[in-house]
Every structure is written in C-alpha cells, then in structure tokens.
Image (cartoon, rainbow, N blue to C red):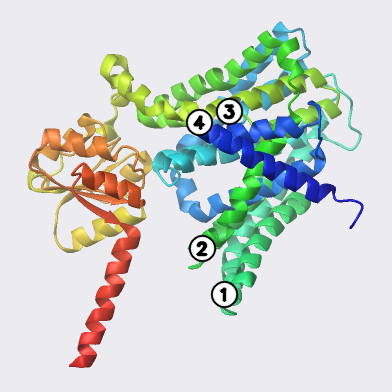
Amino acid sequence: MPHNVSLITTIAAALGLALVFGFIAARMRLPALVGYLLAGIFIGPFTPGFIADVDLAMQLSEIGVMLLMFGVGLHFSLDDLMEVKKIALPGAILQIAVATLLGMGLATTLGWSIGAGLVFGLALSVASTVVLLRALEDRGVLDSVNGRIAVGWLIVEDLVMVVVLVLLPALSGPLGGKADAAAGNLWASLAITLAEVAVFIALMLVVGRKFFPWLLWQVARTNSRELFTLCVVAAAVGIAYASAKLFGVSFALGAFFAGMVLRESDLSHRAAEESLPLREAFSVLFFVSVGMLFDPSVVVNRPLEVLAVVAIIMFGKSIAAFVLVLALRYPLGTALTVSASLAQIGEFSFILAALGVSLELLSTEAQSMILAGAIFSIAFNPFVFKTLEPLQRWLHARSDLARKFERSADPLAELPFTVEQEKLTGQVVLVGYGRVGRHIAGMLATCGVHYVVVEENREMVKQLRSEGVPAVAGSAAEPAVLIQAHIANASVLVIATPDTFHVRTMVETARALNPSIDTVVRTHSEEEARLLKQENAGRIFLGEQELAQGMTGYVIERLKDRQH
C-alpha cells in the first residue's frame, strides 16, 4: 500500500459523506446541495474530527466547474449568446456596480479602508455559475429564454472578474495594500489581458470550431466508447487548462468555450450524455469544497455582519437586477428569474477574496464573512427559485403595478396595426421560436398557414417583425400577451418552448379566452407528458417517442416495399 493516499482519502470522504448528508437532506425535503455543504463543513479544518485535504478538494472542485461549464457550452451556441447581449451586457455591468457600492457601504460602516471595501463589494457582486446551472436544470428552464439570459448575464460577470483579477495587483498599492512589483503598468496590464482574451476567443471561434468537431468525429469512427469519452473529457479539461495558463482566462470560461466549439459537431448530444456522470460527480465536490472553507465561528462572533452580507447578496443585488431587467422592458418573469439567479455567490468570490488577503487589502475576518455569505446564499438559493412561480402569481393577482411592469408601454408587446386581419383569423399561435419553433414556422409558411409568434426574447421579436412575421414579445402565460396574439380567433395553440414550467398556465389561459381552441404541447419528460395528458392539455409530443414512431414507420414502409 502507498503511504500517501490523501487524494483517495479526500475523494472517498467527500463523496461518501456527500451521499449520506445529501440523502438525509432529500428525505427532509431539503435540496441535496444543503447536504453537500454540510458534508464539507463536517470534514473541513474548522470542525473537530477527520480533516480532508482542502487544497486537493479545491482542485477537484475546479474539475467539476470545468465539466459543468463544458456541458453548458454544449447547449449554447454563439447565436444564443448574441441574442441576449443587449440585456446581459449592460445589465451585468450595472448590477456589479450597484452590488459593489452596497458592499463598500457596509465596509465603510465597519470602518474598513476603501481598498478593502472595493474587494469586498466586488466579491459580493458576482454569482456562482455552478449554483445557477444546478437551479436552472432542476427547473427544466436551462434552454429557455430566461435561462439563456441568466447564463449570458453570468458569463459577462465572469469576463468582468477576469479583468478585475488582473487589475487588482496593479491597483493594490494606491488602494492601501501591498504593492505588487510584478504587476507593472496598469494600462499595459489591462491591454495585455484584453488582447489575450480576444486572441483566445478568436482562436476558439475560428480554429476551434473546425478542428475539435473534426477530431471528435475521427475518434467516433474508431467505434470505441472509451476513446470517445476520453476525447470529450480531455477536450474540456485540456482547453480549460490551456486557456488559463496561456491566455489568463478562467478555467470556467475556457471550458465553456470548449463546449461551444464542440457544439458545432453532430456528435455534441452524445458528448453531453457521455460526460454527464462525471459532471454530476465532480459538481458535488464543488459544494463539498465550499463547505470545507467555512469557519462556523464567524457566525457566532459576527452575527449581525454576516446577516448584512447575506442581505446584500440575496436582496440588495437581486433587487438591483430586478429593476434593471424591467427597465430594459423584459417581462416580470424574466426579471424574477435573473434576480433569483444572482441571489448567491461562489467560485469567483473565493478567488477574489483570497487575492485580496494576499495583497493585504482584505482581512481574514472579511474573507470568512464572504464565505459565510456564500454558504447561506447557496443553501437558500433553491428555496428562492421555488418561490418564483407563487410570487409571480401573487404579484399579478394583487398588484396593479406588477401588471403595469409586465406590459409597460412596450411597442413589442402589442401586435402592429399593420398586420392584415385575414392573418389573424383561424391562425396558429406559436409559442417559442427556438430550434423546434423555427422548423414549425417554416413548415406552416410552406403550407400557406398563417401564424403569430409569441416569444420572450425581444431581439428575436424585432428580427421576426423585420421579416414580416407577426410576433409579440412576452410570456404566453399572461392573458394580455395571448390577447395581442388574437388567441380568441385562433384555431390552434402550439407550445414549442422548452420551458415546461408555465405550460399548464398557458393552456388554461388560452382555453379561458378561446374554449374551442386546439392545443399542441412539446415536452421533454415522460412524467411531464403523463401529467399533461391527465390534465387534458391537448396533444402532447414527447421528443423520444416521436422519433421512435418516425423511425418505426419508415422501417415498416421499407419492409412493405420489399414484400411487394
């Protein structure tokens, strides 16, 4: 037996206790990740008993971050990100500014320096992509418009933090910390960082989009499942590592772009399936490692300060994001989803706090308060997401202001008067203009069937209107949106959006406005399909079943042809 088995010990202890505590949490009807965090606290250096290797646990959690971001990249194309840039870019930057000011205000109240307040505020301003992805996947809205906006928002936050991590050493001296002799000139450092990020992105989009899909296809031709899985994991981890070492980009962003370039391959769905077990296992290690960093004594020694930190994370920056999204004329549902997505902090906050301590800008006590805020906000985040739907219903039922926010003098929320009346009688109302919705719309147009698109993505609605397609911006769960789509005169409602969260409300609203309307619903889950059938939601289409029926029909036709 080897004498040094710290890696095996850490993995065994982390996964074993995560299973135990996660199972207990699930039986208590709590999110499993609460159990994972408790497992980390249990084997961390601040509690008695067995202590796992914190440094190894953090490195293992980084692999989890890489694989998880790689999986997100496999679901998101460059076009998806470009569609949300007009809300994600200004929204994320303004939200970071507001959250940083709130953190600096608390730091000033506590008597800290401006430099400490700046680092503290920045650490509280950036949310964890890992936590967000877990929440969106659990609700089945990762591929929805709101999901893409939330992910795009956090990608912008990550890019801003990459720049901050480079600039902070150069600014340390003027801010009252330890001057970093290796930091060099501020403007030179900024120019080099931006150039490196630009070169990395250009290489991935120009060279990577051709090379890596080709490589994946070559490996697939060997008919070796092990080699294919190895190729996928090696691409995710290798590109992430190279991006950090050669271009100064974070592991998370590097892995995200690795997934985006592999998405160009026809084998991207298989790549996502093959990497899923590893993504799940290593993402658990991320939450365990966060728990290991937490010192429970800070809650006892500084309870009011910790409470203030949690309030800034969960309420301060979420309210700021909520107002910003509504100001950009997006629906109330989008504002609530983005707000819930930002009500936590994670990996970049830890990195920033550690850098602040090393530069003598931030005290270790402040670092512990940031970690405490992360623990509580991550643990409460699933509950925040669970409140979204009832909160939205409550606001609409009791608040005229909420209804005004939802339909706030937005020209895209109303169908233009120039649309011919014949196109608004017996038409199809198509909810969602994603990959499936586009195909449906194309076939309807080919058959000469009139249709109106209901889409939450404002940029997509603008594009459709410029092409002469009748389209309305908003959520089809809202009666005002369906009224604008002339649902009362429609013949069929087609729900093609991947967001199954509001399907029942959409169907109920449409039938209330037009009792004779036929409804067609797309779903991804057999359980969801069964529930919708029980509720008589109309004709339900499940992707796997329709694919199987189509293939079987083709096989039977071919067999009949051979018999004749």
User: Real-space Cα distance between discs 4 and 2?
Assistant: 29 Å
Q: Residue 134: x and y, percent?
A: 53, 40
Residue at label 1? 220
Residue at label 3? 379
User: Real-space Cα distance between discs 2 and 3?
Assistant: 32 Å
At label 2, the amino acid type is: Ser
| Mark 1 residue crowding within 10 angstroms, few (<14) / some (14–19) / many (20+) | some
Q: Residue 360: x and y, percent?
A: 86, 23
Residue at label 2? 268
Q: Nearer the viewer, residue 302 or 48?
A: 48
User: Real-space Cα distance between discs 3 and 1?
Assistant: 40 Å
SS type, badge 3: helix
From what the image shows, is residue 184 above or below residue 218? Answer: above
SS type, badge 1: helix
Residue depicted at 60% across the width and 76% down the height: 224
At label 1, the amino acid type is: Ala
Q: Residue 524: x and y, percent?
A: 36, 52
Mark seen at residue 97: none
Residue depicted at 14% across the width and 60% down the height: 448
Q: Nearer the viewer, residue 276 or 62?
A: 276
At label 3, the amino acid type is: Ala
Q: Choose the circle earlier in sequence order: 4 or 2.
A: 2
Q: Image check: 459 left or right of 443?
A: right
Q: Choose the circle earlier in sequence order: 3 or 1.
A: 1
Q: Choose the circle earlier in sequence order: 1 or 2.
A: 1
Residue at label 4? 382
| Mark 3 residue crowding within 10 angstroms, few (<14) / some (14–19) / many (20+) | many
Looking at the rendering, which quadrant does residue 489 occupy? top left
Specify whether residue 416 is in view.
no
Disc 3 versus disc 1: nearer the observer: 3
User: Real-space Cα distance between discs 4 and 3?
Assistant: 7 Å
Residue depicted at 57% across the width and 60% down the height: 261
